[in-house]
């Protein structure tokens, strides 16, 4: 079996054939953690776990891109079908997080891909994301749950926040969809965190050597994921990604680590179970 530790079957992209996609997961013995990105998609991740019961888990959180800061143009994602929130509603998320299927708070973090152009607005934009993250880390501390971190083009700031706020630094976390070099990798490993790899490892990204990164990640710290419907691996020959394609990432890691596919499946499954307490 494999565990897709980061999927979005809760997103609009699967509205037409969700059940079919989930049936394929059952057939291939794939467990799935569906990750929320705002109140709506978090609730939907919980509902999915309720409907399909075993093999489906959920995470709840407010993704930094879904925070309406009023500072950049909003770009609603049709594949997600989510909505923006002006503030983090602590009590509402706390209530969601108490659902039986919730195994983590996520995805939360920093995302500087789209940002304001002027210096002042950029500063404020980053500050608002930092405030959002700290509020969610407070919830993590209260509920003692692991964290699924989303961090895009913001590594240094994330490290600073986690270093300066040691009381709120989570004990257990994964750097989901890891994109970085050995320095960034080491930073996460030093905190004791797991590293999540997905189909992005098949992409050509300037300055990033995924082979070297995977070689330098201890196998007992690796999680595999799809981030579906995004980041479909080329072997899937499908524009939309699905949890069953998580095997391609596992195969690639096996090749780089020079171990069998079975070994990667076994160890990454154990890792996910250990981190998410499932
Ligand atoms: Zn995601």
Image (cartoon, rainbow, N blue to C red):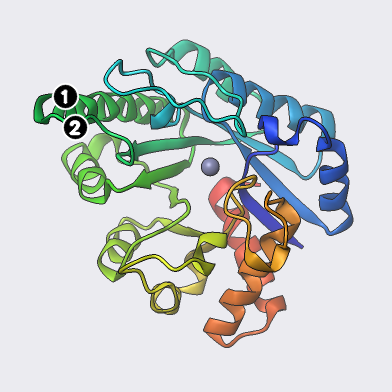
Residue at 17% x, 24% y: name it: 124
Residue at 60% x, 31% y: name it: 80
Using residue 32 as the reference point, say whether residue 134 is left or right of it: left
Reading the image, the residue beneath label 2 is 117
Q: Which mark is residue 121?
A: 1
Indicate if the residue with disc 1 has its beta carbon within 8 Å of ligand 1.
no
Q: Is residue 100 visible?
A: no
Residue at 31% x, 18% y: name it: 69
Residue 36, quarter of picture: top right
Q: Tell me residue 39's x, y (percent).
A: 55, 19
Position of residue 40 relative to residue 191, above or below, is above
Q: Tell me residue 170's x, y (percent).
A: 36, 41
Front-lying residue, 157 or 73: 73
SS at mark 2 in the image: loop
Front-lying residue, 161 or 114: 114
Q: Tell me residue 142's x, y (percent).
A: 41, 25
Residue sitting at the far left: 119
The N terminus, quarter of image: bottom right
Gap in angstroms between the C-alphas marked 1 and 2? 7 Å
Position of residue 31 relative to residue 187, above or below, is above
Q: Tell me residue 74's x, y (percent).
A: 41, 22
Using residue 214 as the reference point, say whether residue 2 is left or right of it: right
Residue sitting at the far bottom: 258
- Tell me if mark 1 has few (under 14), some (14-19) or many (20+) residues whose alpha carbon lies within 10 angstroms of its own: some
SS at mark 1 in the image: helix
The reply to whether the C-beta atoms of the residues labelled 1 and 2 are less than 8 Å apart is yes
Mark 1 or 2: in front is: 2
Position of residue 182 relative to residue 102, above or below, is below
- Tell me if mark 2 has few (under 14), some (14-19) or many (20+) residues whose alpha carbon lies within 10 angstroms of its own: few
Front-lying residue, 183 or 188: 183
């Amino acid at each position: 079996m494999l565990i897709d530790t980061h999927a979005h079957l809760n997103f609009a992209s699967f509205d037409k054939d969700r059940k079919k996609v989930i049936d394929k997961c059952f057939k291939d013995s794939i467990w799935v953690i569906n990750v929320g990105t705002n109140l709506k998609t978090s609730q939907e991740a919980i509902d999915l776990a309720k409907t399909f019961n075993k093999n489906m888990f959920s995470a709840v959180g407010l993704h930094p891109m879904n925070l309406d800061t009023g500072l950049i143009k909003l770009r609603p994602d049709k594949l997600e079908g989510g909505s923006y929130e002006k503030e983090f509603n602590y009590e509402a998320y706390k209530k969601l997080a108490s659902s039986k299927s919730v195994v983590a708070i996520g995805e939360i973090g920093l995302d500087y891909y789209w940002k304001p152009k002027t210096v002042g607005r950029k500063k404020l934009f980053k500050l608002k994301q930092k405030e959002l993250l700290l509020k969610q880390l407070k919830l993590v501390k209260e509920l003692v749950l692991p964290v699924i971190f989303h961090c895009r083009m913001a590594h240094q700031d994330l490290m600073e926040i986690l270093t300066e706020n040691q009381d709120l630094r989570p004990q257990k976390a994964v750097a989901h969809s890891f994109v970085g070099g050995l320095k960034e990798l080491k930073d996460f490993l030093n905190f004791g965190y797991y590293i999540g790899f997905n189909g992005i490892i098949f992409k050509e990204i300037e300055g990033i050597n995924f082979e070297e990164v995977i070689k330098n990640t201890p196998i007992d710290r690796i999680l595999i994921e799809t981030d579906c419907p995004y980041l479909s691996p080329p072997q899937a020959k499908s524009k939309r990604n699905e949890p069953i394609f998580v095997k391609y990432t596992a195969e690639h890691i096996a090749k780089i680590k020079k171990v069998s596919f079975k070994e990667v499946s076994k160890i990454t499954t154990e890792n996910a179970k250990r981190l998410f307490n499932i």
